[in-house]
Image (cartoon, helix red, strand yellow):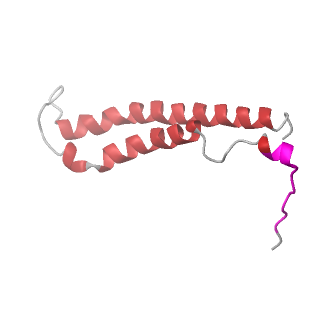
Amino acid sequence: MSTEVRQTSGEEGSRSLPPVTPERVLAGLALAVPVVTVLWVSSYAKLTPTVGGMPFFYWYQILWIPVSAVFTGAAYLLVGRDEKQRKAVRGGDV
């Protein structure tokens, strides 16, 4: 297996974005929030308060379905924004 190393001039190398950008950090956090909150069972392992006769344990988990979709969508938009910035820095080439 061979790997190709691309040599860049000092000018081109200074125009590249770092691997870790604020957008990518926020996207990672947006993806981590739903995972951590749902896996932290002791925070919602209770029966009260009930909503429509449904115990808290169940409606809390169901509530996180659309909330997780919002967080995932936000992460998608953040990564897309980061990719557009990277493409602009590279000069529009793919």
In this view of the protein, which residue sits in the foreground, 13 or 35?
Answer: 13
At a point 39% along the width and 41% down the height, the residue shown is 33
At a point 76% along the width and 42% down the height, the residue shown is 16
In this view of the protein, which residue sits in the foreground, 67 or 91?
Answer: 91
Q: Residue furthest top?
A: 52
At a point 80% along the width and 47% down the height, the residue shown is 13
Q: Residue furthest left?
A: 48
- Left or right of 60, for residue 90: right
Q: Residue furthest front?
A: 10
- The image quarter containing residue 6 is bottom right
The image quadrant where one finds the N terminus is: bottom right
Image spot of residue 77 (x, y percent): 59, 31
The image quadrant where one finds the C terminus is: top right
Q: Residue furthest bottom?
A: 1
Vertical side of 62 occupied by 41: above or below: below
- Left or right of 48, for residue 63: right
Image spot of residue 34 (x, y percent): 39, 41
In this view of the protein, which residue sits in the foreground, 64 or 4?
Answer: 4
Q: Most prominent secondary structure in the magenta stretch? A: loop
Q: What stretch is highlighted in magenta?
A: 3-13
At a point 84% along the width and 34% down the height, the residue shown is 92
Image spot of residue 69 (x, y percent): 46, 33
Count of numbered tags: 0
Image spot of residue 76 (x, y percent): 58, 35
- Left or right of 60, for residue 69: right
Asked if residue 2 is among those painted magenta in the image, a careful observer would answer no
